[in-house]
Image (spheres, rainbow, N blue to C red):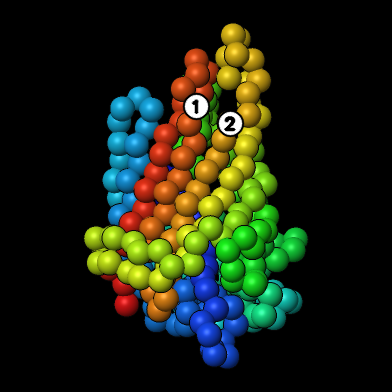
Amino acid sequence: MRAATALLSLAALLAGCSDPPGASLFPLEQGRTWTYRLTTEWENNTSDREAVVLSNEGRDSVLDSGSAYRRRSDAGIDYWLRADNTGVYRVATKSDVDDAPKLDPQPRFVLKAPIAVGTTWQASTTTYLLRRRAEFPPEIRHSHPSIPMHYVIEALAEKVETPAGAFDKCVRVRGEGKLRLFADPVQGWRDMPLTTLEWYCPGVGLVRVERSEPANTTFLTGGTMKMELMSWQ
């Protein structure tokens, strides 16, 4: 199950640029595409690998909320986003099984201005790796579709190596959340940590994501996920 598309973020305001904050590091213009290698390592010592493709489809009207930029994943999910002086944020989503886009109750920031070390915000996430060992469906996200995650900009000038090449002056964003679950009869209820690291680079966008959802309990299992840029245009 592809999780990478839930993992969108953005970038830095270039000095002297008249575009909204994040416009260079989270490109929204039509015709841009990104191909990623998504590797998942599970706690049972198995792994999965697949390719993920994201593409920008141009401006669309979203119900009665006006126009927004549509981004589509090859997993069949569309996202509508806007960029202004407050940052870059999502306003709606739609899967292939939905009749119409679902508006977010309030804008879901991908990155909030000002683009500076220490800027924080909160957005919802879900679990992509945590599973119950002996229940169906095993994925925790079915029972916990919306979990608060706190984000912070940690760095503005990182260098990142990917299969697509090396990138400079990248923004690193950390997201942290927790989900209280019944681990097993011995440990009882535990706060399970959810951690995301994201890197965005000028003129390119998202180049790397690392996600960690450890469990290692009798009732629960988790893992780690890495998404790396393979090609872009």
Q: Residue at x 62, y 60 (%)?
A: 118
Q: Residue at x 44, y 61 (%)?
A: 199
Instruction: Decide if residue 18 is in sight here.
Output: yes
The amino acid pointed to by label 2 is Met
| Residue 41 position by quadrant | top left
> Which label number is shown at residue 192?
2
Q: CA distance from mark 1 to mark 2?
A: 7 Å
Q: Secondary structure at mark 2?
A: strand
Is 91 located above or below residue 221 in the figure? Answer: below
Is 12 located above or below residue 171 in the figure? Answer: below
Label 2 crowd (10 A; few <14 / some 14-19 / many >=20): some
Query: Residue 215 vs residue 91: left or right?
Result: left
Image location of residue 233, percent across then percent down: 32, 77
| Residue 16 position by quadrant | bottom right
Q: Earlier in the sequence, mark 1 or mark 2?
A: 2
> Which label number is shown at residue 122?
none
The amino acid pointed to by label 1 is Ala
Q: Are marks 1 and 2 in contact (CB under 8 Å)?
A: yes
Label 1 crowd (10 A; few <14 / some 14-19 / many >=20): many
| Residue 83 position by quadrant | bottom right
Q: Quarter holding the N terminus?
A: top left
Residue that badge 1 annotates: 215
Image location of residue 100, percent across then percent down: 63, 65
Q: Residue at x 35, y 25 (%)?
A: 44
